Image (tube, rainbow, N blue to C red):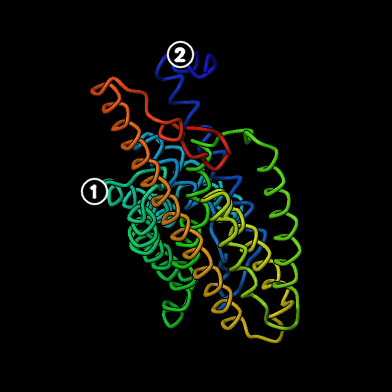
Amino acid sequence: MTAVAGIRAWPRPVVLALETLAVSASYYATGRLGLLRQLSVEDAVVTPVWPPTGLAVACLLVLGLRAVPGIVLGALFVIMSITSITSLTPGVVVTLFGNTAGPVCALFLLRRADFRTDLSRLRDGLALVFLAALASMLISASIGVGALIHAGKLDTDSFWPVWLAWWVGDAMGVVIVTPLLLLLTRVRWPPARPRRWVQAVALTVITGALVWLATHSPVSLLYLVFPLLVWGALSFEHAGSMLCALFASVMASIAATDRAGPFRGLTDVEVMMKLQAFNGSMALTALLLSAVITEQRNTRRSVERACQELVEVLEHLTGTTPPRSAHERLPDEDGQRR
């Protein structure tokens, strides 16, 4: 806390410059990670999941519009790293605008929907999926593919297949990456009881084994991932389910680009369709299930607090001491009394 207070006490221009550098560096790093695995659709190279989009939405939700310069700078670095462009041509400017306009639109839509960054309600999960991922990323995909066609790098007949792949990749970045980054702003470390460590280790080991089997077995076993998402959500809420979803998405993308396991023998379009159908259904299940569980647990805690306050009021009015069981609070997920 001292370090954070010290940073906030710095001159505002210094803080803004550090935030811009941090956002741009993170955007560039996640962009390079996303480019490690690529698929070809209609002679265009696309990524199954584009993490920088999820990073951009998370930064905007936490920092507000002051994160925009960092997003633009990071996107420029990514474009320059994969092309021979060394100056701001009209095509680059349009692409930068598209990469920034989608996340900014997501920010305004989520604010209008009263979005909470702790994802503690089902409506927050639905807003992130339908407003930030599916609706807002229509902008970035349309502008990006339109710029490619205008520059002559893509045929007009290839617009819809490439647009769909671009849109789904950006949307998956929001659904998978954004919740995990928002989780980092409120994570508690370390867990209070050793039992939580045992659960975490068991979930990690079993997830690693089953996900590898599901994504590399010649028999289609991708459905084995879904019980792991349920286990992660019930035990660790968003932290468990979304980490499982991220790992499964990475392993599935590796298998898809290597044409291994359930993706063997498929065409490029079939690989993209199967991979994105799996990623989308898995991420949606993990996010919404975690949101439902978190909302129910928060409701239960609110009811318990209200009952405890009522007991204390009755005790004060009657001047008697209620039985011990009336004062006891149920343990939370870490096994501590609340």
Asked whether, in this view, residue 69 is left or right of residue 233, the answer is: left
Q: Secondary structure at mark 2?
A: loop
Quarter where residue 225 is shown: bottom right
Residue 5 sits above or below residue 59 on the image:
above
Query: Which residue is nearer to you in this view: 69 or 4?
Result: 4
Where in the figure is residue 243, as x and y percent of width and height?
60, 53
Q: Secondary structure at mark 1?
A: helix
Residue 199 sits above or below residue 68 on the image:
below
Query: Which residue is nearer to you in this view: 222 or 108?
Result: 222
Where in the figure is residue 292, as x and y percent of width and height?
41, 57
Identified at 43% across, 83% down, the residue is 157
Indicate the amino acid at tag 1. Answer: Arg
Identified at 37% across, 64% down, the residue is 134
Query: Which residue is nearer to you in this view: 207 or 6?
Result: 207
Of circles 2 and 1, which is in front? 1
Label whose residue precedes the other's in the sequence (2 or 1): 2
- The numbered dot on residue 112 is 1
Dot 1 surroundings within 10 Å: few (below 14), some, or many (20 or more)?
Answer: few
Indicate the amino acid at tag 2. Answer: Trp
Where in the figure is residue 135, as x and y percent of width and height?
33, 63
Identified at 75% across, 71% down, the residue is 213
Between the residue at mark 2 and the residue at mark 1, the CA separation in whole angstroms equals: 32 Å
Asked whether, in this view, residue 158 is left or right of residue 134, the answer is: right
The residue that label 2 is drawn on is 10
Query: Which residue is nearer to you in this view: 301 or 5?
Result: 301
Quarter where residue 13 is shown: top left
